[in-house]
Amino acid sequence: MLEEMIGQIIVVDLRGQYVVLGTLLRFDDHCLELRNADLHDLRDADSTRELYVLEARVTGVQRNRKRVLVVRAEVVAVSRLEDVVDE
C-alpha cells in the first residue's frame, strides 16, 4: 500500500499532537522519509487536526522541513492529501 504513495503528498497522523504532511520519498520497517514536509504541532494552532489538513489541501503544504524521518511506531494513519474530503 505505501508503495503506491511514493512520490505523492501524504498526510501522516501521529500519536499525540503532531501531524506531518509531505512527499513520501521512501520507507522501511522503521521509518517513513518525507521531503518538503510540514511537521506540525497541533498545540501551536487554534484549529483541529482535520481543519489544518483541509486547509493544507486548499493552500498547499507549508514546508518547514526539507527532509523528515517519521518513526513508524508513532504512526496512526497515512493517506494521500488528495484523498482528504470535506463532507
Image (spheres, rainbow, N blue to C red):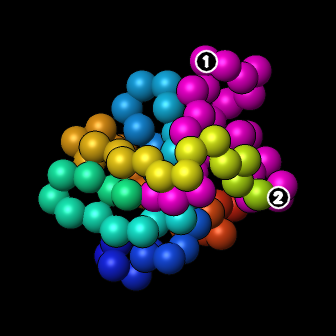
Left or right of 42 on screen, residue 67: left
Within the magenta stretch, is there residue 63?
A: no
Labelled pair 1, 2 in contact (Cβ < 8 Å) = no
The structure residue drawn at horizontal position 83% and vertical position 55%, both measured from the top left corner, is 59
| Residue 10: numbered disc | none
Is any atom of residue 50 visible in this view?
no
- Magenta-drawn segment: 34-59
Left or right of 11 on screen, residue 85: right
The structure residue drawn at horizontal position 18% and vertical position 52%, both measured from the top left corner, is 30
Q: Which residue is mark 2?
A: 58
List x then y, in percent, for residue 50.
65, 42
Q: Tag 1: residue type?
A: Arg
Looking at this rendering, what residue extends furthest in the left direction? 29
Query: From the viewer's perspective, is residue 7 above or below residue 32?
Result: below
Q: Which residue is mark 1?
A: 43
User: SS class of the residue under badge 2?
Assistant: helix
- Tell me which numbered mark, 1 or 2, is placed earlier along the sequence: 1
Nearer to us in this view, 39 or 10: 39
The structure residue drawn at horizontal position 53% and vertical position 65%, both measured from the top left corner, is 23
Left or right of 35 on screen, residue 54: right
Within the magenta stretch, is there residue 49?
A: yes
List x then y, in percent, for residue 18.
50, 32
